[in-house]
């Protein structure tokens, strides 16, 4: 539905908040009812990826992003792609990890339209790119170092 609404309109924000709330609630409900599964985790990560792709498709045409942000985003995307490739080669599965940093970055990305609306693109881009860089590098290191795939690993710093 987001693709068919005017970006940053009240209808857009309504659908946007509903999408985010259902994403949070489905994982919470699955854990509370012992319905969490590997397939569910993969589907959730895939849905998150699609949601971010849709948001980029919607937001990129309406915002002017500075060149340094584009370069930084290319770098983050490259690290994430390398991490997924290494994970797929090692584990024969898409290794979208549910680390604390990935979750924090996801929350910040979800809040992007609000931050953009309130803080502008430069400040918002800087903080989001910092968080996404840390999350991407951590995920890459985990996929390189780990012997087995653990989707719900919290951090490379925690055992």
Image: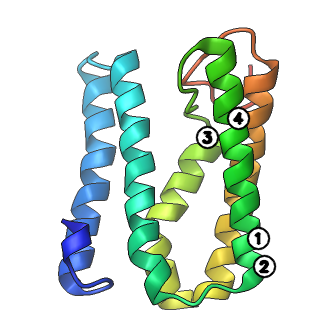
Q: CA distance from mark 3 to mark 4?
A: 17 Å
Q: Earlier in the sequence, mark 3 or mark 4?
A: 4
Mark found first going from the N terminus, 2 or 4: 2
**85 up-or-down from 129: above or below:** above
Q: Is residue 99 left or right of residue 9?
A: right
Residue at x-position 78% and y-position 79%? 68
Dot 3: element: helix
Residue located beneath label 4 in the image: 83
For the point 75% across and 27% down, which residue is it?
142
Location of mark 2 (residue):
68
Quadrant holding the N terminus: bottom left
Secondary element at image label 1: helix
| Residue highlighted by disc 3 | 100
What is the CA distance from the residue labelled 1 to the residue labelled 3? 25 Å
Task: Give how far across and how far down residue 109 sits, in percent.
Answer: 51, 63
Is the residue 37 above or below the residue 125 in the image? above
């Amino acid at each position: 539905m987001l693709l068919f609404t005017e970006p940053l309109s009240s209808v857009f924000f309504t659908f946007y908040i509903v999408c985010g709330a259902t994403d949070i609630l489905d994982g919470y409900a699955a854990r509370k009812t012992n319905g969490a599964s590997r397939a569910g985790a993969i589907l959730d990560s895939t849905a998150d990826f699609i949601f971010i792709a849709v948001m980029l498709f919607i937001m990129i045409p309406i915002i002017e992003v500075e060149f340094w942000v584009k370069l930084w985003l290319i770098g983050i995307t490259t690290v994430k792609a390398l991490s997924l490739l290494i994970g797929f080669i090692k584990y024969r599965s898409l290794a979208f990890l549910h680390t604390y940093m990935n979750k924090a970055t996801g929350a910040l990305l979800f809040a992007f339209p609000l931050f953009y609306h309130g803080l502008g693109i430069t400040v918002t881009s800087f903080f989001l790119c910092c968080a996404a860089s840390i999350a991407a590098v951590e995920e890459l290191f985990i996929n390189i170092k780990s012997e087995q795939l653990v989707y719900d690993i919290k951090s490379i710093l925690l055992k």
